[in-house]
């Protein structure tokens, strides 16, 4: 029923507002360079949820229209998580890795935190008969920057 969809959208707006308030405080506290833009995206998404909720509430919204509005909101939030939140995760993982590298004693390679969305290192393998695994050159799989652009049907949040 449309009123159930409206209630779910109300719950989603409340939950995400609380979650994102904490996330925005954390980004600002940690000095995330894109914190302002990230917060503006959150505000646009909350406004998008409110608009969908209002559209469902207006005169006799039909169930298919209500479901469509909720699905569009879900797609917008998912896209935000797959793009903007992934950038946030990459920033903090890279910063943690820089700290590990800076604090490592000379000649010691620290275990680095994987960067979200990046390919994992390819295990070392002997490249010549009789060569040990340790002596073989290290090969690394292509990183996320080498992957083809996304073919998603992302609609920018208005």
Image (cartoon, helix red, strand yellow):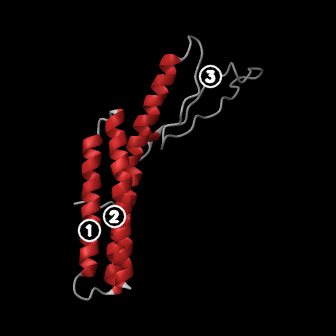
Q: Residue 71 carries which label?
A: none
Question: What is the distance, in whole Å, between disc 3 and disc 1 at their CAs?
Answer: 55 Å
Residue at numbered disc 2: 13
Tell me the element at label 3.
loop
**Where is residue 42 shown, x and y percent of the image?**
29, 54
* Quarter of the rendering occupied by the C terminus: bottom left
Tell me the element at label 2.
helix
Q: In which quarter of the image is residue 59?
A: bottom left
Cβ atoms at labels 3 and 1 below 8 Å apart? no
Please name the residue shown 34% across and 70% down the image: 10
Question: What is the distance, in whole Å, between disc 2 and disc 3 at their CAs?
Answer: 51 Å
Can you see residue 149? no
Cβ atoms at labels 2 and 1 below 8 Å apart? yes
Q: Residue 137 carries which label?
A: 3
Marked residue nearer the N-terminal end (2 or 1): 2
Please name the residue shown 33% across and 45% down the image: 24
**Is 56 left, or right, of 110 in this rendering?**
left
Q: Residue 50 carries which label?
A: 1
Tell me the element at label 1.
helix
**Is 29 left, or right, of 134 in this rendering?**
left
Please name the residue shown 39% across and 48% down the image: 85
**Where is residue 101 shown, x and y percent of the image?**
50, 20
Marked residue nearer the N-terminal end (3 or 1): 1
**Is 60 left, or right, of 78 in this rendering?**
left
Extreme residue in the top direction: 106
Q: In this view, does 56 lie above or below 88?
A: below
Q: In which quarter of the image is residue 13?
A: bottom left
């Amino acid at each position: 029923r449309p009123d159930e969809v409206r209630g779910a959208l109300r719950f989603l707006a409340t939950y995400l507002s609380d979650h994102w308030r904490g996330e925005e405080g954390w980004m600002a506290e940690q000095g995330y360079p894109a914190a302002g833009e990230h917060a503006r995206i959150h505000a646009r998404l909350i406004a998008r949820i409110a608009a969908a909720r209002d559209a469902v509430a207006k005169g006799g919204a039909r169930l298919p229209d209500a479901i469509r509005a909720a699905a569009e909101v879900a797609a917008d939030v998912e896209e935000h998580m797959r793009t903007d939140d992934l950038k946030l995760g990459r920033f903090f993982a890279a910063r943690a890795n820089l700290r590990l590298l800076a604090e490592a004693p000379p000649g010691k390679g620290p275990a680095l935190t994987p960067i979200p969305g990046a390919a994992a290192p390819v295990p070392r393998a002997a490249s010549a008969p009789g060569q040990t695994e340790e002596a073989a050159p290290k090969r690394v799989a292509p990183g996320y920057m080498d992957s083809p652009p996304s073919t998603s049907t992302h609609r920018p949040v208005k």
